[in-house]
Image (spheres, rainbow, N blue to C red):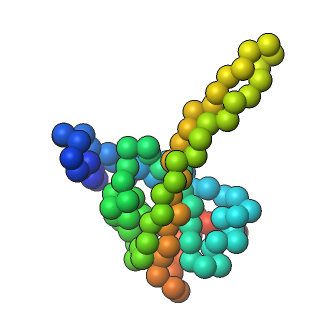
Amino acid sequence: MTLPLKGRGDSRLNILEILRKPLLTEKGSILQEQNKYMFHVSPKANKPQIREAVEKAFDVKVLAVNVTMVRGKTKRRGIRWVKTPGWKKAVVTIQPGQKIPVFEAT
């Protein structure tokens, strides 16, 4: 399923291109208690596309989507300084009582 990018011509993103991977971090596990889940998403995706992708991929009702751009870090590699690429993070709030099985411990 492809979702159109509004206002950007004929570009389309697949659900798998929008939701790149779930973020399994300590902060993310604390947010799960509040029905919030973190994802690494495409930098081209906007909030409505992220909402629709999560609803279709996991069959849940999304209440809110918060998005932030994470800056790349400057690191030293030998005598050179290199910068890691920046990326986009989305915190998705779902309806109480629903779960996303990817984040559940087995």
The image quadrant that residue 48 belongs to is bottom left
Closer to us: 72 or 33: 72
Left or right: 66 as drawn, with respect to 48: right
- Position of residue 99 measured from the top left corner of the image (x, y, whole percent): 54, 76
Pick the quarter of the image with the C terminus.
bottom right
Furthest-bottom residue in this view = 97
Left or right: 38 as drawn, with respect to 8: right
The answer to whether residue 17 is above or below residue 76 is below
Left or right: 96 as drawn, with respect to 59: right
- Position of residue 17 measured from the top left corner of the image (x, y, whole percent): 41, 45
Residue at the spot 54% in from the left edge and 56% down from the top edge: 39
- Position of residue 62 measured from the top left corner of the image (x, y, whole percent): 41, 73
Furthest-left residue in this view = 10
- Please say whether residue 60 is visible from this viewpoint: no
Residue at the spot 56% in from the left edge and 77% down from the top edge: 35
Furthest-right residue in this view = 78
The answer to whether residue 102 is above or below residue 13 is below
Left or right: 85 as drawn, with respect to 30: left
- Position of residue 8 measured from the top left corner of the image (x, y, whole percent): 23, 42
Residue at the spot 53% in from the left edge and 63% down from the top edge: 91
Give the total number of marks visible in the rendering: 0
Closer to us: 14 or 69: 69
The answer to whether residue 78 is above or below residue 103 is above
Closer to us: 69 or 18: 69
- Please say whether residue 54 is visible from this viewpoint: yes
Residue at the spot 63% in from the left edge and 31% down from the top edge: 84
